[in-house]
Image (cartoon, rainbow, N blue to C red):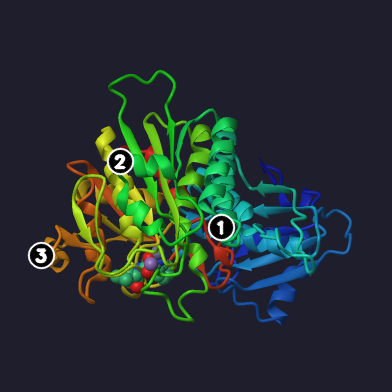
């Protein structure tokens, strides 16, 4: 999909479908509506009035122009955007997502969208978010369909009503959205295909394409290095684990160049182990590598974004299954950093594989670590299905992660790393156990992870809610969302 911008007046654009925003707090439904209505001699307003179109967010109205002379677009899609006074640039994702979806279902080859002129709306931001809406709202996962294959027919997207040039923003957004789409593909793919081996292959191929340094540890190396927690989780699986480690080094980097590591949980199927998940909880557990997929997606775009910091991407990957060899409640293992962990619940496996990955990267000596994991159902109970939780051992860094998510238009909230709850992780026989009590489950998970980062400035994002969508919503498509790819790119490109 190719995105371009233009100053041209909407009625002069030759396009199969023109999308315009309409607002509910303006009797005239907003400027673009008025302009297009005038060009159509009042036809649009007549239709909207008759249909009692109220411009509520998400509502749409389609008008065929049937080749009217002097009017370029073949169709006009009016997209309700609610009150103009409340409009944020990120809301424009819904405008272009609606347009691309309407066009795809009609097998049209392109769309144009008019960016509304609303007070306080920054043009560059409007371009960025409306490009995102088109690129992500048009996402389809067809790999395994043999019938009802939905087509991505829209190849060109024209953003109209844009005065300046924003080529660089469009290029960065296009690269970022390719990363988001990759993350979505990996989450949507079935778990017998998306294995640790497969993730490592994709990572290796990407690294070669992009010129990133990569190391992939196989089972023998993971064992030899003493990543015993990752080994323990893998014990019940017939598929080998992998630990993937890319490094992006900016041009001209030296020993003073700051570094940040992105660590993602790559649990390709979480059956829960002997604490097996019941029906109703197990079905979607292919999503449990969404943190790893987000890191892969961000690494996919990192060369295009060219941040000034060294960026490490680390993904520990395994399945969590049952077998005669699987780890058991009561087992005690020594982590890579030497701490002993008593397994009290084999379904609290994400923190185990992350613990070894965090020890590995913090011992290498990075300045900042952010981990991403579909770690706890408790986080979804606390914040609902759309918002990620952020924990950090450094309040200022936690706030930076939150600010990066805000800039990316991804919802996240800073949660307390409540030290008092650490006592819940006390074990009678080992340094700690891998679960706390029932209450504060997302906090005790974060506290567990904090034991494996040494003194490194670290933040943890629990993305169990937002990485998977039960239903489509604007630019978010059903299934894997690619959540956090954009936030990570913002984070590594901003001030750390
Ligand atoms: N992968 C799950 C968390 C999860 C739950 C992600 C729902 C997405 C949706 C994780 O490994 C898990 O099983 N966590 C347990 C922890 C508990 C045993 C302390 C949970 O949340 O129930
Ligand atoms: Mn689990
Ligand atoms: Zn899990």
Task: Report how far apart the C-alphas of labels 1 and 2 lie in the structure.
Answer: 38 Å
Residue at horizontal 25%, vertical 46%?
458
Judged left or right of residue 373, residue 71 is right
Circle 1/circle 3 CB separation < 8 Å: no
Q: Earlier in the sequence, mark 1 or mark 2?
A: 1
| Mark 1 in CB contact with mark 2 (< 8 angstroms) | no
Q: Quadrant of residue 26?
A: bottom right
Q: Is residue 129 above or below residue 91?
A: above
In the rendering, which numbered label is found on residue 283? none
Q: Secondary structure at mark 1?
A: helix
Closer to the chain start, of discs 2 and 3, is 2
In-image side of 183 versus 323 (left or right): right
Q: Which residue is mark 1?
A: 93
Q: Position of residue 159 (x, y in %)?
A: 65, 48
Give the quarter the ligand 2 occupies. bottom left
What residue sits 81% from the left and 60% below the top?
A: 107
- Total number of numbered discs in the rendering: 3
The residue sitting at 41% across, 56% down in the picture is: 234
Q: Give the residue at mark 2.
A: 360
Question: Could you tell me if residue 383 is visible in this image?
Answer: no
Looking at the picture, does residue 287 appear above or below residue 231?
A: below
What distance separates the C-alpha of mark 2 from that of mark 3? 27 Å
1 or 3: tag closer to the N-terminus: 1
Q: Position of residue 99 (x, y in %)?
A: 68, 61
Residue 420 is tagged as: 3
Could you say whether the residue bearing mark 2 is in a helix, strand or loop? Answer: helix
């Amino acid at each position: 999909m190719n995105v371009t911008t233009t100053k041209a007046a909407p009625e002069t654009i030759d396009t199969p479908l023109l999308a315009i925003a309409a607002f509910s707090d303006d009797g005239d439904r907003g400027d673009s509506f008025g302009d297009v209505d005038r060009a159509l001699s009042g036809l649009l307003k007549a239709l909207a009035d008759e249909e009692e179109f109220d411009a509520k967010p998400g509502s749409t109205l389609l008008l065929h122009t049937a080749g009217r002379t002097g009017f370029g677009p073949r169709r006009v899609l009016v997209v309700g955007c609610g009150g103009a006074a409340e409009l944020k640039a990120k809301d424009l994702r819904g405008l272009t997502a609606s347009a691309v979806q309407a066009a795809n279902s009609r097998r049209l080859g392109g769309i144009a969208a008019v960016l509304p002129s609303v007070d306080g709306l920054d043009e560059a931001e409007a371009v960025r978010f409306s490009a995102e809406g088109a690129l992500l709202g048009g996402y389809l996962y067809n790999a395994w369909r043999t019938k009802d294959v939905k087509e991505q027919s829209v190849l060109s997207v024209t953003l109209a009503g844009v005065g300046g040039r924003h080529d660089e923003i469009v290029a960065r957004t296009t690269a970022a959205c390719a990363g988001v789409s990759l993350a979505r593909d990996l989450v949507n793919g079935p778990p017998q295909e998306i294995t640790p081996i497969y993730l490592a292959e994709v990572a290796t191929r990407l690294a070669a394409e992009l010129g990133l340094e990569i190391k992939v540890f196989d089972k023998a190396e993971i064992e030899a290095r003493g990543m015993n927690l990752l080994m323990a989780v893998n014990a019940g699986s017939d598929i080998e684990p992998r630990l993937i480690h890319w490094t992006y080094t900016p041009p001209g980097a030296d020993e003073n160049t700051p570094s940040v590591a992105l660590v993602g949980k790559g649990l390709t199927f979480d059956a829960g182990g002997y604490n097996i998940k019941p029906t109703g909880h197990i079905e979607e557990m292919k999503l449990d590598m969404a943190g790893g997929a987000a890191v892969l997606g961000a690494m996919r775009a990192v060369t295009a974004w060219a941040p000034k910091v060294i960026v490490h991407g680390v993904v520990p990957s395994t399945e969590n299954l049952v077998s005669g060899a699987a780890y058991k409640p009561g087992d005690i293992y020594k982590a890579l950093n030497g701490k002993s962990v008593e397994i009290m619940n084999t379904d609290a496996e994400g923190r185990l594989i992350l613990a070894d990955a965090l020890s590995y990267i913090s011992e290498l000596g990075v300045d900042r670590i952010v981990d991403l994991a579909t770690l706890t159902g408790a986080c979804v109970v606390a914040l609902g299905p759309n918002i990620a939780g952020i924990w950090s051992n450094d309040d200022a860094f936690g706030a930076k992660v939150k600010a990066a998510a805000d800039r990316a238009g991804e919802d996240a909230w800073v949660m307390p790393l409540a030290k008092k709850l650490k006592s819940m992780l006390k074990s009678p026989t080992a340094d700690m156990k891998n679960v706390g009590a029932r209450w504060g489950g997302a906090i005790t998970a974060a506290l567990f992870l904090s034991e494996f980062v040494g003194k490194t400035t670290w933040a943890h994002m629990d993305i169990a809610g937002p990485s998977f969508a039960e239903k489509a919503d604007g630019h978010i498509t059903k299934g894997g969302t690619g959540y956090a790819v954009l936030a990570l790119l913002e984070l590594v490109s901003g001030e750390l």
